[in-house]
Amino acid sequence: MDNHQWQLLSKLPNVGNSIFAVMTQLANENNAINLSQGFPDFPISEKLISLVNKYMNMGYNQYSPMPGVLKLREVISEIVNKTYSAHYDPVTEITITAGATQAIYTIISAIVRADDEVIIFEPAYDSYAPAVKVNGGLVKYATLKQPDFSIDWEKFPALISSRTRMIIINSPHNPSGTVLSHNDINQLIRITRNRDILILSDEVYEHLIFDGLKHESLCRYPELASKSFVVGSFGKTFHATGWKTGFVLAPANLTAELRKIHQFLVFSANTPIQYAFAEFLEDEANYIHLPDFYQKKRDTFLKLIKKSRFKPLKCSGTYFLTLDYGDISDENEMDFAVRLTREHKIASIPFSAFYNKNNNNNLLRFCFAKTDETLEKAAKILCKI
């Protein structure tokens, strides 16, 4: 190979590997319990696996239609209508994607132009800002208030300008596990009314909400739904993150723009898996009990670490628990997370990775979507620290 080094001007000069990849690799290298990356370590439904095999054997192994298998879109439309009293046309307003991350990137690529401003609440999932920046957009950060990670609606309007193109929200929220309230929705309606601002609502944990709380999907609110892309994930819902299948709900005019990019990014998502999800979703028993299932996981983990020196923050959704280690160490989050992985054999995610300036608050995020055996082993380690 030619030794000449091309002087490539990076479009994302300050971006390295995702913190999830970094910590998972570190966990693997140190044979540590991996509570960092958000994936379950328990099996998915045998019925769902058999359905995928069924449709493979039936010959559904070629490209699906670009917007997704129609049967799946019809089932999603029915569920959304039943759950949120909202109608999305399966033909023109629902698109199946190769996971939620692809959906988010595609939406941003379709909407954000050079010098458009996008407001992101931080701590924020790490794919939002890079997607905005690589498309020439400018990110403005709204910092959530601690310790409850609530939105400061009094300060928020100051971030809006004539160049604000989009607001990205995420509820249930990764990494904090908080959920938006009805008041939050009313504030969002008030602030965006009569403004040419679109909303990207990341709702991949919509079925993972605890303590009897209701998911305030933007689908419920026509004024917001009319200018919103709502993103969902089957990977999160059915413990099948490696299948990379998600979806986007949006009005026809927004969906048309989304699909212009979607068709050239992946064209279509996995075909037999879409057919399998379509049949699996017809029985609501396959997803209706998810809040109880994961709340039990959360409560089990909380009980197991009760005698540790870590202080848990409130978790109302997702499958992540935030632990404050301020009584244990004054190390910064990344250093402490790395030391936990190497010395104590347990991997987490430092909260600083979710801030653009790597803010340190003595917080680590732990994934509790694990078997009870894994949680017991992890808790035993945490209680000894």
Image (spheres, rainbow, N blue to C red):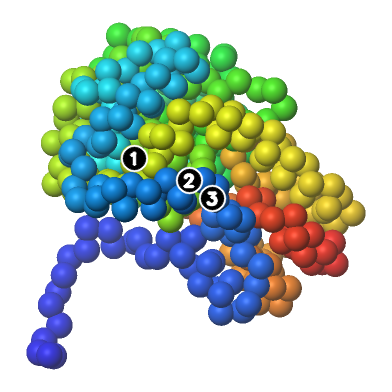
Residue 275: mark in rendering: 1
Left or right: where 364 falls relative to 254: right
Pinpoint residue 354: horizontal percent, then vertical percent.
Answer: 50, 50
Question: Does residue 231 lie above or below 241 as drawn?
Answer: above
Residue indicated by mark 2: 48
Q: Which sits in the foreground, 341 or 5?
A: 341
Q: Quadrant of residue 14?
A: bottom left
Which residue occupies 48% across, 68% down?
Answer: 22
Q: Residue at x 10, y 89 (%)?
A: 2
Mark 3 vs 2: CB contact within 8 A: yes
Tell me how far mark 1 sits from mark 2, CA to CA: 10 Å
Dot 1 and dot 2 residues touching (CB under 8 Å): no
Residue 257 shown left or right of residue 279 in the figure: left
Tell whether 284 sits left or right of 375.
left
Q: Depth check: 65 or 230 in front? A: 65
The answer to whether any part of residue 156 appears in the image is yes
The residue identified by callout 3 is 46
View extreme (front): residue: 58
**Closer-to-camera residue (287/138):** 287
Picture quadrant of residue 81:
top left
Instruction: Place residue 103 in its image quadrant.
Output: top left
Q: Report the amino acid beneath label 3.
A: Glu
In the picture shown, does residue 46 fall above or below 316?
Answer: below
* Residue 144 in the image, given as x and y percentages of width and height: 56, 35
Within 10 Å of disc 3 (Cα), the crowding (few <14, some 14-19, many 20+) is few
